Amino acid sequence: MIIVTGGAGFIGSNFVHNWLGHETEPVLVADKFTYAANAENLAHFAEDPRLRIERIDVSDRVAVEQLFAHNQPSSVVHFAAESHVDRSIRGPAEFVKTNIIGTFTLLEAARTFWSELGGEARDRFRFVHVSTDEVFGSLGPDDPPFTERSAYEPNSPYAASKASSDHLVRAFHQTYGLPCVTTNCTNNFGPYQFPEKLIPLVILNATAGLRLPVYGDGMQVRDWVYVADHCDAVRVILARGRVGETYNIGSRSELTNVQVVHAICRLLDDLRPASGRMHEELIEFVADRLGHDRRYAIDPAKLESELSWRPQHSFDAALHKTVKWYLANEGWCERVRSGEYRRWMELHYGTGQPEVLGAVT
Ligand code: NAD
Ligand code: TYD
């Protein structure tokens, strides 16, 4: 089987759906089940013998060594991480622990395991490290998009921790020959995304009649990719990517945050009209994020030309699908908006839900 770390989080669980929809090889999800994980994301496979789930912290060396020894994986796809920039600004320590120490621990265990393999299993083994475009820092308005050759200039503690993990992965390949491939993807959106991130946060706040917090002037640019397209790319890279290489993943879909928020509001005006007002009336410009990167954009030409990957979804069609998914899954939304979510909203936005942002009347 393949091991998928972080497989109960947003992209990891989408990857499990994607994998089990296309491949026969079983999956072992290895996940610590932090606030960002949700067993419900994998409930569809509750009766499917091809999926097993183990609760494990990737920075726990003994547990990770046992994970390899007991399960003899054919490959590892490493999604597990602390992933939210705003949380990394408030508390970077957990990012260092999971993203750096956790990746290091996993690499060490993978190296020991792989070095004892022989024959086809050794040739076939891959360590796919899932990373982000945020390691490259921020682009100016007229800069060309990031390529695999762009310099690393991480600005947030999150980006710095992911950059460190990318360097460790590179070093384990260069030094020990571990067959690693790294992916650097742009901003994802789609089903099962925890609503601390912009798109699901705006959808859920808007449907609840709460204010839509836009940082600074809202003119920061992100390059959006639908999560299923990202998962297709990771699957293709696992199968055919060249070891020791990195691949940028993106859909050439740059938009300002204000454009994204307006697009969601327009969709909701259509799909779930609010009586007496347009959803965009809920938009509120709030204090900017510290060190806020102005623009991310990815050039996916290498992935397209080498591995013939193409995104299958336009931004508009995928956003429509995503908004409909959140509207159709009110139970999921209600359950994730408890506990840790409420605590975060209170801490970060200064008020609560709905008492935090204040329901607009
Ligand atoms: P997420 O926060 O939704 O999920 C992360 C998962 O990792 C959770 O299930 C969590 O429980 C698990 N996890 C956290 N710490 C762990 C630990 N110590 N041991 C084991 N499991 C642990 O994140 P996501 O948005 O799904 O991102 C997944 C990966 O993709 C991350 O590595 C992230 O850096 C990368 N990435 C994300 C985006 C994006 O837009 N979300 C874009 C590019 C790359
Ligand atoms: P986010 O979804 O946190 O992803 P990332 O920081 O990894 O790009 O944020 C996307 C953009 O939206 C980013 O420029 C920050 C902005 N943003 C807001 O304006 N308001 C919010 O409440 C959040 C969470 C993000």
Image (cartoon, rainbow, N blue to C red):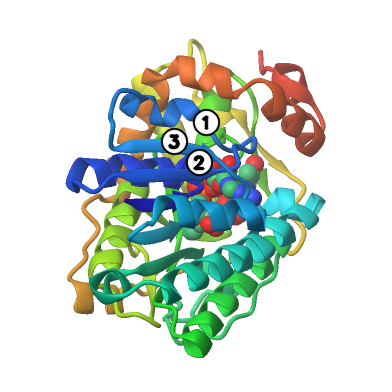
Q: Give whichever of 131, 43 is nearer the camera.
A: 43
Horizontally, is 321 left or right of 55 in the view?
A: left
* Disc with the residue nearer the chain's start (2 vs 3): 2
Instruction: State which quarter of the image contains the C terminus.
Output: top right
Calculate the distance from the C-alpha at mark 3 to the C-alpha at mark 1: 24 Å
Q: Nearer the viewer, mark 3 or mark 1?
A: 1
Query: Helix or strand or loop: what does disc 3 sit on?
Result: helix
Q: Which residue is mark 2?
A: 9
Horizontally, is 66 left or right of 85 in the view?
A: left
Return the mark for residue 38. 1
- Residue sitting farthest toward the top: 275
Q: Residue at x 32, y 60 (%)?
A: 74
Q: In the rendered structure, which amino acid carries the disc numbered 1?
A: Asn
Is residue 292 visible from the viewing direction of this image?
A: no
Mark 2 residue CB less than 8 A from any atom of ligand 1: yes
Q: In the rendered structure, which amino acid carries the disc numbered 2?
A: Gly
Query: Helix or strand or loop: what does disc 1 sit on?
Result: loop
Q: Position of residue 186 (x, y in %)?
A: 45, 61
Q: Position of residue 150 (x, y in %)?
A: 50, 84
Q: Residue at x 57, y 24 (%)?
A: 336
Query: Helix or strand or loop: what does disc 2 sit on?
Result: loop
Label count reads 3
Q: Which residue is mark 3?
A: 264
Residue 304 placement: quadrant: bottom left
Q: Position of residue 351 (x, y in %)?
A: 80, 27
Mark 1 residue CB less than 8 A from any atom of ligand 1: yes
Calculate the distance from the C-alpha at mark 2 to the C-alpha at mark 3: 23 Å
Q: Give whichever of 234, 294 is nearer the camera.
A: 234
| Mark 2 residue crowding within 10 angstroms, few (<14) / some (14–19) / many (20+) | many
